[in-house]
Image (spheres, helix red, strand yellow):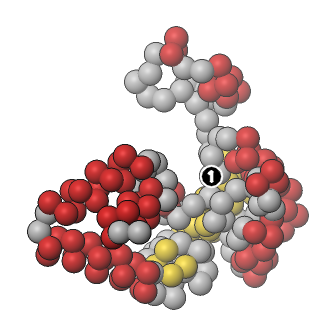
Amino acid sequence: MSAIERLTDEFSRLPGIGSKTALRLVHHLMKGSRDETRRLARALVDLAEKIRACDVCGNFSEHELCDVCSNPRRDRSLLCVVEEAYEVGAIERTGQYRGLFHVLGGRLSPLDGIGPEELNIAALLARIDRSAGEIREVIVATNASVEGEATSVFLEQEIRPLGPRVTRLARGIPVGSDLEYVDGTTIAQALAGRREM
């Protein structure tokens, strides 16, 4: 297998990258300067050698503790549980959340062989238990998929006996959308979560 084929194969393993896009990326790299390609290669090596899971929350970090866990100004009474580490960034970019995070590393999916043991759930429960009441609210921010909903129900059943309030992200109609184009499930969730004006 040639270097072009090997790299095309590696790119096509990435989510959202098909074989045609992978080949286009390889050709882009070949047309560029050798320095650009070396910078990309160094960045990939650095990623593999320097990035690790935070010892507390499971977020990606270059240190034992991620930037969120090591920040003393974060609200330690709030804990937001997400499926994947990149979702921490999505919530952080809002500028509205000042609490801590916990990354599950996926969601429950029995058909795919992913149960509670394959996720970072035991560490979450131990973390809440060790907090001795300091964590007063756990926000379950799993996706609105069938697996995400099943994960949220499972987590609620496991967390509630430990004492903190368990909440779920609100669901509803995106700002700027027209009702005629919104799916029925989203409209139903928006109706169920309606609030006083």
Residue 171's image quarter? top right
Quadrant where the image shows the N terminus: bottom left
Residue 137 in the image: above or below residue 66 = above
Q: Residue at x 67, y 41 (%)?
A: 145
Q: Is residue 183 visible?
A: yes
Q: Which residue is drawn at the image coordinates 66% and 65% (left, top)?
A: 104
Front-lying residue, 68 or 26 = 26
Q: Is residue 152 above or below residue 129?
A: above
Number of marks: 1
Location of the C terminus (image quadrant) = top right
What residue is pinned by disc 1? Answer: 141
Q: Position of residue 11 (x, y in %)?
A: 41, 60
Q: Nearer the viewer, residue 3 or 104?
A: 3
- Determine the residue positioned at 78% across, 74% down: 122
* Residue ranking furthest to the top: 180
1 relative position to 38: left or right: right
Instruction: Decide which of 66, 2 is in the foreground and name it.
Output: 2
Task: Farthest residue to the front: give it.
Answer: 1
Residue occupying image coordinates x 60% and y 75%: 57
The residue tagged with tag 1: helix, strand or loop? loop
Examine the rendered structure and indicate whether residue 45 appears above or below residue 30.
below
Disc 1 crowd rating (10 Å Cα; few below 14, some 14-19, many 20+) is many
